[in-house]
Image (cartoon, rainbow, N blue to C red):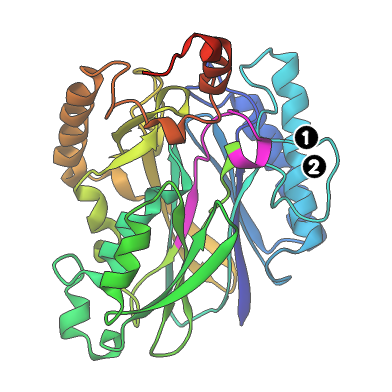
């Protein structure tokens, strides 16, 4: 049975500041999606949050970029924005960059990850959702999941993974893409995905069967808006078991926190901390960046779950490491490497400051 798995998210109003999502917005999102399920547009859905981002996880049979499904999400975000404005929530509607729906939500602000799959006899899927970070945040974890035998022992001992995986990598600044065959092109690929501010892993495919293994959102919000309106807060869908890494191998990269861009005003580097859904409330310097993981089993398109995968106490050390890394970076204040380099500050107030002071720069 072919199933489309869609995750669409947006920041349409923070409570309080950029820290969390008001329950009235989640209730409205649930109402909209429940109506679509009753009408038959959706097979199933789950509404959740990560920080101040509203997350719609949906299954249906209409394929990716479907106008009706995307309009459902858009209209729900519009309704939620109206509530956010009434409650005077911070940044109400900030991810909705236009006032009218244009056919799908890509390029309009919300983040989107989708895949069409042939549902297997057992189909475990993990949905990763992050707050206070950018789309390239998935590059390192996706590398570890599908390329690194020190993370994924299945690459060594499971014969159906020996063929490796294909990575679709997007240049988010020039709107180009390239596909790398791994493991033989790992070194070439790392040249690019090691620069996550520009290159993002969009999708991963099994070379054994050609089936999609992972899909992520690569929308870069500041580039779409032409100004700073918050970070991308990306999502990523990963299939597990069988010809793909086991659930534990999919989660393992997050036991070693890595540095991502985002955090306060989207202008700082910080550790990506794996947390439970209830702990995805970034308050310290509007952070540090958080990632949650919702685990599902699919059953004829029905979402059996979620399991809050990072609620496991086995990730306590990772959380402590992330907090220690956050302390170290915060000592730098407005200095790099805590603050992003100048080329990544082009969508903040930096251009206005440079323009104001341009006449005071003299040749040496």
Mark-to-mark CA distance, 2 and 1: 5 Å
Label 2: how many Cα within 10 Å (few below 14, some 14–19, many 20+): some
* Vertical order, 127 against 301 (above or below): above
- Nearer to us in this view, 95 or 81: 95
Where residue 58 appears, as percent x and y from the top left, is 62, 57
Quadrant of the image occupied by residue 98: top right
The residue range painted magenta reads 223-237
The reply to whether the magenta stretch includes residue 38 is no
Where residue 201 appears, as percent x and y from the top left, is 44, 61
Tell me which secondary structure the magenta stretch mostly adopts.
loop
Q: Are marks 2 and 1 in contact (CB under 8 Å)?
A: yes
The reply to whether the magenta stretch includes residue 226 is yes
- Nearer to us in this view, 302 or 53: 53
Residue 148 horizontal side relative to residue 288, left or right: left
Residue 35 horizontal side relative to residue 188, left or right: right
Q: Residue at x 62, y 54 (%)?
A: 45
**Residue at which label 1 appears:** 78
Where residue 43 appears, as percent x and y from the top left, is 68, 64
Q: Residue at x 20, y 49 (%)?
A: 255
* SS at circle 1: helix
* SS at circle 2: helix
**Residue at which label 2 appears:** 75
């Amino acid at each position: 049975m072919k199933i489309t798995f869609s995750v669409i998210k947006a920041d349409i109003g923070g409570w309080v500041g950029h820290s969390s999502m008001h329950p009235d917005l989640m209730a409205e999102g649930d109402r909209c999606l429940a109506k679509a399920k009753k009408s038959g547009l959706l097979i199933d859905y789950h509404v959740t949050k990560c920080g101040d981002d509203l997350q719609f996880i949906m299954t249906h049979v209409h394929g990716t970029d479907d106008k009706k499904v995307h309009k459902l999400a858009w209209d729900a975000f519009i309704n939620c924005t109206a509530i956010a404005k009434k409650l005077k929530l911070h940044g109400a509607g900030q991810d909705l960059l236009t006032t009218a729906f244009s056919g799908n939500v890509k390029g309009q602000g919300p983040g989107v990850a989708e895949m069409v799959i042939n549902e297997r006899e057992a189909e475990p899927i993990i949905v990763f959702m992050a707050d206070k970070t950018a789309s390239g945040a998935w590059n390192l974890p996706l590398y570890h999941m599908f390329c690194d035998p020190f993370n994924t022992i299945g690459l060594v001992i499971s014969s159906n993974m020996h063929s490796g995986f294909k990575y679709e990598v997007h240049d988010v600044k020039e709107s180009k893409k390239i596909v790398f065959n791994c493991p033989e092109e790992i070194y070439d690929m790392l040249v690019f995905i090691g620069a996550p501010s520009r290159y993002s892993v969009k999708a991963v495919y099994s070379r054994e069967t050609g089936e999609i293994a992972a899909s992520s959102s690569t929308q870069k919000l500041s580039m779409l808006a032409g100004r700073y309106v918050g970070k991308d807060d990306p999502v990523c869908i990963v299939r597990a078991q069988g010809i793909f890494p086991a659930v534990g191998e999919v989660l393992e990269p997050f036991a070693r926190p890595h540095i991502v861009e985002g955090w306060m005003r989207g202008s700082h580097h910080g550790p990506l901390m794996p947390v439970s859904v209830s702990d995805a409330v970034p308050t310290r310097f509007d952070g540090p960046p958080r990632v949650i993981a919702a685990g599902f089993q699919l059953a004829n398109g029905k979402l059996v779950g979620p399991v809050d995968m990072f609620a496991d106490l086995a990730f306590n050390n990772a959380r402590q490491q992330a907090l220690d890394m956050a302390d170290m970076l915060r000592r730098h204040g407005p200095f790099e490497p805590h603050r992003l380099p100048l080329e990544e500050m082009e969508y903040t107030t930096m251009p206005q400051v440079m323009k104001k002071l341009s006449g005071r720069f003299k040749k040496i």
